[in-house]
Image (cartoon, rainbow, N blue to C red):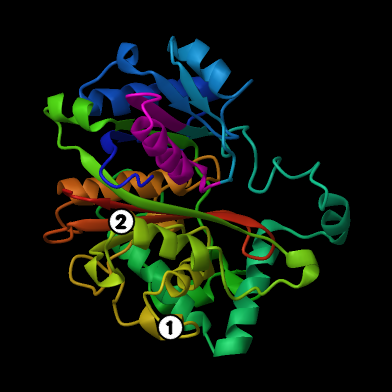
């Protein structure tokens, strides 16, 4: 069963805060849920499904629905790290198409700056591989650095090319009053910033923020009754990538498989895509993902991202026009939700005018949950302005 046109994103909301010492995790969840429903023109009483991941406190969806006062009859707690929320939209669309629900609420919240889970904290300490890998002191940054160094070795990718990705994000973030980092940076400034794990510099890394976001996915019938412009879900693909018992290739991601599935279901080609929201935990994440999604040849990503290709509004493939995880927001160390939200803004024509992509008809959002140097859940989501 295809989900193409079977569900719409009716509401989207991103918490404006990046440092929230006085708000609990539940309060952040509640605020973004109320915001997304208000954006859609709906209320909690309309919700009959809730989707939450590992950031949901307590018993996940069960605790969330009780806290929010939702009498939902459908719930989903799929956990794929930062890409979980794109999977939730896919799963919500499938559930709606199957008649299981009509209004699905998906939310994310986190507080890593003010007492919450730190980057890389939790979620894997009891995994079967933990005793073998954690022994050697592997960290989040060092794992991505290994992937970056291998890509450089195999294809000649340079630090300057990776830095161009950060530059594009910063050019966009200057127009976002909520962005954590709003100063435009240069390639030289990126590669002159402190080296965190060779070859990744501090400015190659994402920000650490409190905050959250939520989206509301509805049936076509509900969408037809709303005054708000609703964004149709055209297609989605999900795929794992793991270490293959030690025979891991660090130069590609699960997008190699999730991308073709999403394009096939959406019935569009890469040339049809006007805007991309690409998970940007680190600059290398963006470069490898763009290659694996087929926007350029494998190994050619360094050249592809140079010379303003990713910069809105006139670049060949504008990306992360809110500043992305590299400059704007990475709430709870999970960037997938914000990728959906900015794609919705672009398709509605509601991005900041300075970065609004002209005639944006098709947008792609992609999440990378996990690590490039270990295991990940990759999810690709394609949306349109209209069917």
Residue 357's spot in the image, x, y percent?
18, 60
Tell me the element at label 1.
Answer: loop
- Residue closer to the observer: 91 or 116: 91
Query: Do we see residue 204 in this rendering?
Result: yes
Q: Is residue 285 above or below residue 199?
A: above
| Residue 32, quarter of the rendered image | top left
Residue 322's spot in the image, x, y percent?
31, 52
How many badges with numbers are in the image? 2
Q: Is residue 344 above or below residue 327?
A: above
Instruction: Tell whether 281 sits left or right of 307.
Output: right
Closer to the N terminus: mark 2 or mark 1? Answer: 2
Query: Pointer 2: what residue?
Result: 266
Query: Pointer 1: what residue?
Result: 297
| Residue 39, quarter of the rendered image | top left
State which mark lies toward you, 2 or 1: 2
Are the residues flagged by discs 2 and 1 in contact, CB closer than 8 Å?
no
Residue at 63% over, 32% down: 115
How much space separates mark 2 and mark 1, taking CA atoms? 22 Å
- Residue farthest to the front? 1
Instruction: Tell whether 98 sits left or right of 4.
Output: right
Q: Residues within 10 Å of mark 2 (few under 14, many from 20)?
A: many
Q: Quadrant of the N terminus?
A: top left
- Residue closer to the observer: 211 or 280: 280
Instruction: Tell whether 92 sits left or right of 219.
Output: right
Q: Which residues are magenta?
A: 82-107
Residue at 63% over, 47% down: 119
């Amino acid at each position: 069963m295809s989900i193409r046109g079977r569900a719409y994103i009716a509401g989207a909301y991103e918490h404006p805060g990046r440092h929230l010492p006085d708000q609990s995790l539940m309060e952040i969840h509640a605020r973004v849920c109320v915001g997304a429903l208000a954006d859609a023109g709906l209320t909690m009483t309309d919700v009959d499904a809730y989707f939450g991941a590992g950031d949901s406190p307590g018993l996940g969806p069960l605790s969330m629905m009780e806290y929010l006062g939702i009498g939902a009859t459908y719930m989903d707690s799929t956990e794929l790290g930062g890409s979980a929320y794109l999977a939730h939209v896919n799963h919500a669309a499938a559930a709606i198409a199957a008649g299981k629900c009509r209004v699905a609420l998906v939310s994310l919240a986190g507080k890593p700056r003010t007492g919450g889970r730190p980057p890389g904290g939790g979620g894997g300490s009891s995994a079967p591989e933990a005793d073998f890998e954690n022994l050697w002191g592997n960290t989040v940054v060092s794992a991505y650095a290994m992937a970056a160094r291998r890509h450089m070795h195999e294809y000649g990718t340079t630090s300057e090319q990776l830095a161009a990705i950060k530059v594009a994000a910063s050019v966009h973030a200057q127009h976002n009053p909520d962005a954590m980092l709003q100063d435009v940076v240069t390639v030289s400034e990126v590669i002159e910033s402190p080296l965190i794990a060779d070859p990744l510099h501090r400015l190659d890394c994402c920000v650490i923020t409190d905050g959250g976001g939520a989206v509301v996915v509805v049936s076509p019938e509900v969408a037809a009754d709303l005054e708000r412009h609703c964004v149709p879900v055209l297609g989605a693909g999900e795929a794992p990538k793991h270490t293959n018992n030690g025979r891991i290739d660090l130069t590609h991601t699960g997008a190699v498989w999730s991308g073709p599935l999403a394009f096939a279901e959406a019935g569009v080609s890469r040339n049809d895509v006007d805007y991309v929201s690409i998970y940007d935990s680190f600059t290398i994440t963006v470069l490898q993902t763009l290659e694996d999604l087929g926007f350029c040849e494998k190994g050619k990503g360094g050249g592809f991202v140079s010379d303003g290709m990713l910069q809105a509004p006139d670049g060949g493939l504008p990306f992360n026009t809110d500043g992305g995880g590299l400059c704007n927001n990475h709430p709870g160390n999970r960037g997938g939700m914000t990728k959906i939200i900015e794609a919705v803004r672009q398709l509605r024509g509601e991005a900041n005018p300075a970065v609004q992509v002209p005639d944006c008809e098709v947008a792609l959002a992609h999440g990378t949950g996990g690590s490039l140097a270990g295991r990940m859940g990759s999810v690709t989501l394609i949306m349109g302005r209209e069917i």
